[in-house]
């Protein structure tokens, strides 16, 4: 009888040991972010938008909202305007932020390395491009009727327009 009780106790202990622990109050961390341009003195960032392949803000029509996901030092843009298919966020040589026609690679390939880093912890991260955390916006001369501001990463000693709105690019958890 004692052998039977010890055997049942041993089997119960082994069964419990194979059961994964239950996490109370935990949740899967958000892997999706929105991007915004935080201007000096502002309490909230300007939420970025997509117009065709350009990253802009301040539009009331002719744009798509989007989210981003990080893949190492690469960023994918996911937008209903692109049928929710991931597309790579990149910056041209002049710093203009654009969205490509294809997804970002999942790893560095052919010597190509991503240029994006994300600094901080919590619900808001600071975004850097090539180690630079200064981003700015200029009116888009090709869209005078719709308006909006074209967003750039600072890449050199000058800006793409006179009197740009200079700030910090932030990623906010969804």
Image: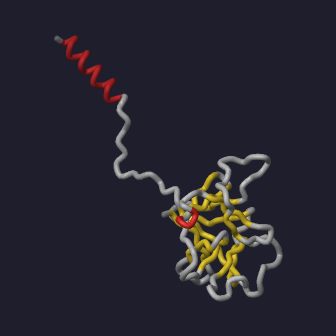
Measured as percent of width and height from the top left, residue 12 is found at 27, 24
Above or below for 118 versus 41: above
The residue at 55%/60% (across/down) is 121
> Could you tell whether 123 is left or right of 14 in the image?
right
**Foreground residue, 101 or 50?**
101
In the figure, residue 88 lies in which quadrant?
bottom right
Above or below for 114 versus 127: above
The residue at 54%/60% (across/down) is 84
The residue at 51%/63% (across/down) is 173
**Foreground residue, 9 or 51?**
51
The residue at the far left in this view is: 1
The residue at 68%/79% (across/down) is 137
**Foreground residue, 68 or 78?**
78
> Could you tell whether 89 is left or right of 2 in the image?
right
Viewport quadrant of the N terminus: top left
The residue at the far right in this view is: 157
Measured as percent of width and height from the top left, residue 58 is found at 58, 82
């Amino acid at each position: 009888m004692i052998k039977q009780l010890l055997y049942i106790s041993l089997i119960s202990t082994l069964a419990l040991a194979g059961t994964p622990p239950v996490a109370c109050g935990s949740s899967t961390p958000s892997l999706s972010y929105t991007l915004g341009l935080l201007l000096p003195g502002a309490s909230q960032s300007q939420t970025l938008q997509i117009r065709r392949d350009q990253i802009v803000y301040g539009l009331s029509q002719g744009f798509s909202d989007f989210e981003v996901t990080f893949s190492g030092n690469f960023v994918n843009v996911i937008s209903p305007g692109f049928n929710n298919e991931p597309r790579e966020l990149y910056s041209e040589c002049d710093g203009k932020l654009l969205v490509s026609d294809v997804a970002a690679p999942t790893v560095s390939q052919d010597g190509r390395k991503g240029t994006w880093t994300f600094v901080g912890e919590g619900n808001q991260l600071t975004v850097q491009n090539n180690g630079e955390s200064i981003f700015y916006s200029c009116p888009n001369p090709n869209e005078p009727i719709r308006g909006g501001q074209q967003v750039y990463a600072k890449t050199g000693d000058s800006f793409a327009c006179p009197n740009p709105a200079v700030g910090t690019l932030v990623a906010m958890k969804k």
